[in-house]
Image: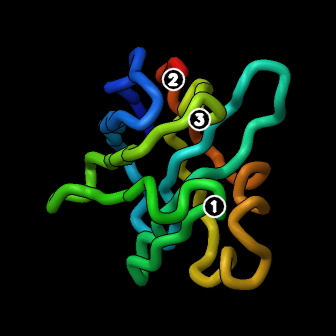
Amino acid sequence: QVQLVESGGGLVQSGGSLRLSCQASGLPPNSYYIGWFRQAPGKEREAVSCISHNDGNVYYADFVKGRFTISRDNTGNTLYLQMNDVKPEDTAVYYCAVGSIRQGYVDDYGLDSLTSRMDFWGKGTLVLVSS
């Protein structure tokens, strides 16, 4: 069973930086995506960034390109999201998630399509950006 625990959220000023971490265990042995999603108050959950485990491809939502960086440690069990130049609209609960999905799925259907396909979710960590 996959378990995901996020940490690193908090209050940050606009223009500042924050790094989120996700400690993962029980990851699938085969093809999967692991990534970050967020849900702002009153809005639907959306994909932020993900990594395709098999080929290492990285994907970003347009609204974070150039500001956020996703990465994993050498063991692959810790996922990070480095958030730079944060904006008030980045305020949300950030979730780590894993989905046993074939390689190439995001290339075919887009990053947003992952949101409904992920199998395991963490409980989330709150990021508050003050203006």
| Image point (47%, 22%), residue name | 125
In front of the other: 77 or 90: 90
Q: Which label sits in the foreground, 2 or 1? A: 2
Q: Is residue 17 left or right of residue 123?
A: left
| Image point (66%, 51%), residue name | 47
Q: Which residue is mark 2?
A: 129
Q: Which mark is residue 102?
A: none
Q: Can I make out residue 1 in this image?
A: no
Q: Which mark is residue 90?
A: 3
Q: In the image, residue 124 lies at what x, y percent?
A: 52, 24
Q: In the image, residue 2 lies at what x, y percent?
A: 45, 41
Q: Are marks 2 and 1 in contact (CB under 8 Å)?
A: no
Q: Amino acid at mark 2?
A: Val
Q: Can I make out residue 106 in this image?
A: yes
Callout 1 environment at 10 Å: few (<14), some (14 to 19), or many (20+)?
Answer: some
Callout 3 environment at 10 Å: few (<14), some (14 to 19), or many (20+)?
Answer: many
Q: Which mark is residue 61?
A: 1
What kind of element bears circle 3?
helix
| Image point (28%, 57%), residue name | 72
Q: Which label sits in the foreground, 1 or 3? A: 3
Q: Decide which of tag 3 and tag 2 comes sooner along the chain.
A: 3
Q: Decide which of tag 1 and tag 3 comes sooner along the chain.
A: 1
What kind of element bears circle 1?
loop
In front of the other: 62 or 108: 62
Q: In the image, residue 24 lies at what x, y percent?
A: 34, 41
In front of the other: 83 or 4: 83
Return the residue found at the far left: 74
Quadrant of residue 105 within the rendered picture = bottom right
Q: Amino acid at mark 3?
A: Asp
Q: In the image, residue 111 lies at what x, y percent?
A: 69, 65
Q: Are marks 3 and 2 in contact (CB under 8 Å)?
A: yes
What kind of element bears circle 2?
strand
